[in-house]
Amino acid sequence: GAVVSQHPSWVICKSGTSVKIECRSLDFQATTMFWYRQFPKQSLMLMATSNEGSKATYEQGVEKDKFLINHASLTLSTLTVTSAHPEDSSFYICSASRDRVYQPQHFGDGTRLSIL
Amino acid sequence: EDQVTQSPEALRLQEGESSSLNCSYTVSGLRGLFWYRQDPGKGPEFLFTLYSAGEEKEKERLKATLTKKESFLHITAPKPEDSATYLCAVLFGNEKLTFGTGTRLTIIP
């Protein structure tokens, strides 16, 4: 159990394009979903936390107008990178948890975003 | 500031050669410690959760232990398929996971 699906796995697009990434918990209801960014050979950096039906909480330094997060249901969260530029190229990973604190986070397989 | 440090950064072992990976953290209301395995180009795969000092968890060739200042991931008689980056993440009082930078483990046949 505890499968998280992330789509797409790879995106290449031109500068100025907006890109939407989906994260779904397939076999459990996720009270909380998280979005991370990972640079090569570095650890995961939390971008934002979202709870179903409420606004996402963004980490310091993360532009909420650039990275739009929607958590419309207990199984789906989306991250939209608006007007993407080359510096937004990175590996984006979502995770989902049954609760905010004590249950482990289960991760999707990530989305490799390349902006030309 | 709450910090998580993993060592070594990289480890190469012969198949069957047991060893341990370390995760140390500054104490600020530890609520849980999590171990994950990450393969290249993939998201982290959950392995263990530890909540209190003295707790131990086992799964196949892996065993995780926790003290008040650090956690160890012991790997016994590893196989090549155990090669991966092992990540430690700590949940502090602010309810956010803080990840270490990982240990890149390579098992040589």
Image (cartoon, coloured by chain):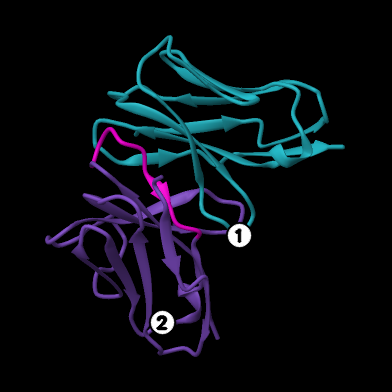
Chain colours: A purple, B cyan
Query: Separation of disc 1 and disc 2 at Cα?
Result: 21 Å
Main SS of residues in magenta: loop
Q: Position of residue A109 (x, y in %)?
A: 50, 59
Provide the residue span drawn in magenta.
A100-109
Residue placed under numbered mark 2 in the picture: A84
On the image, the x and y values in percent for residue B25 come to: 44, 26
What is the three-letter code of the residue carrying label 1?
Answer: Gly
**For residue B2, above or below residue B74:** below
Marked residue chain, label 2: A
Q: Residue at x 66, y 31 (%)?
A: B8
- The residue at 78%/39% (across/down) is B80
Q: Which residue is mark 1?
A: B41
Q: Residue at x 41, y 56 (%)?
A: A4
Query: Who's the residue at 36% across and 38% down the image?
Result: A104
Taking B13 as reference, is A3 left or right? Answer: left
Q: Crowdedness of circle 2 by 10 Å Cα count: few (<14), some, many (20+)? A: many
Q: Is B19 on the left-hand or right-hand side of B33?
A: right
**Mark 2 residue element:** loop
